Image (tube, helix red, strand yellow):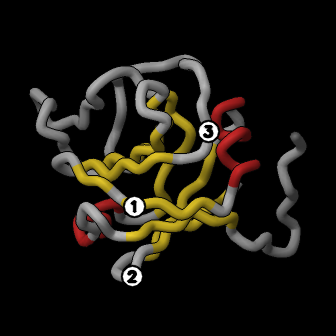
Amino acid sequence: MKIIFKTSKVTIEGELNNSQTALKIYEKLPIEAKANTWGDEIYFEIPVSLKPENATLDVEVGDIAYWPEGDCLCIFFGRPPISTNNKPRPASKVNIVGKVLGDASILKNIESGDKITVTRKELSIGEQRPFF
């Protein structure tokens, strides 16, 4: 399930996994929100309220995650302030729902307050829609 994140400064694709959390988020697209930044993490509220699903503190650069405590979608492109090594670390456990396709460092151009939209990517020939 491919998606597109877009602001006035950045457009980048992502791909959602087949978790129940990812499917619920995909069903709600398109989403428009105000971006927040926390170090090298972007997060924003989405109209989904879900419970933890295989929640973890172990994330990688480029991961897209749902933060159950804040009903937010998060994108990790480096180290948030809480990180103690070179890996990103969320404030609390998140559900990994996908991965950014391409160079996640482009997300450094997004600032708190920027409008961000998340949409479904148009299907290419041969691609199939997910079954809900």
Query: Residue 48: which numbered mark, if any?
Result: 3
Q: How many marks?
A: 3
Say whether marks 1 and 3 touch (CB < 8 Å).
no
| Residue type, mark 3 in image | Val
Q: Residues within 10 Å of mark 3 (few under 14, many from 20)?
A: some
Q: Is residue 40 left or right of residue 29?
A: left
| Residue type, mark 1 in image | Lys
Q: Is residue 132 left or right of residue 107?
A: right
Q: Residues within 10 Å of mark 1 (few under 14, many from 20)?
A: some
The residue closer to the viewer here, 117 or 105, is 117
The residue closer to the viewer here, 41 or 14, is 41
Q: From what the image shows, is residue 68 above or below residue 63?
A: above
Q: Residue at x 15, y 31 (%)?
A: 83
Q: Earlier in the sequence, mark 3 or mark 2?
A: 2
Say whether marks 1 and 2 touch (CB < 8 Å).
no
- 3 vs 2, front mark: 3
Distance from Cα at disc 3 to Cα at disc 2: 24 Å
The residue closer to the viewer here, 8 or 56, is 8
* Residue reaching furthest to the bottom: 8
Residue 56, x across and y down, in percent: 42, 20
The residue closer to the viewer here, 84 or 94, is 94
Residue ID for mark 1: 34
Distance from Cα at disc 1 to Cα at disc 3: 15 Å
Residue ID for mark 2: 8
Quadrant where the C terminus is found in the figure: top right
Q: Residue at x 39, y 21 (%)?
A: 93
Secondary structure under tag 2 reads: loop
Secondary structure under tag 1 reads: strand
Q: Earlier in the sequence, mark 1 or mark 3?
A: 1
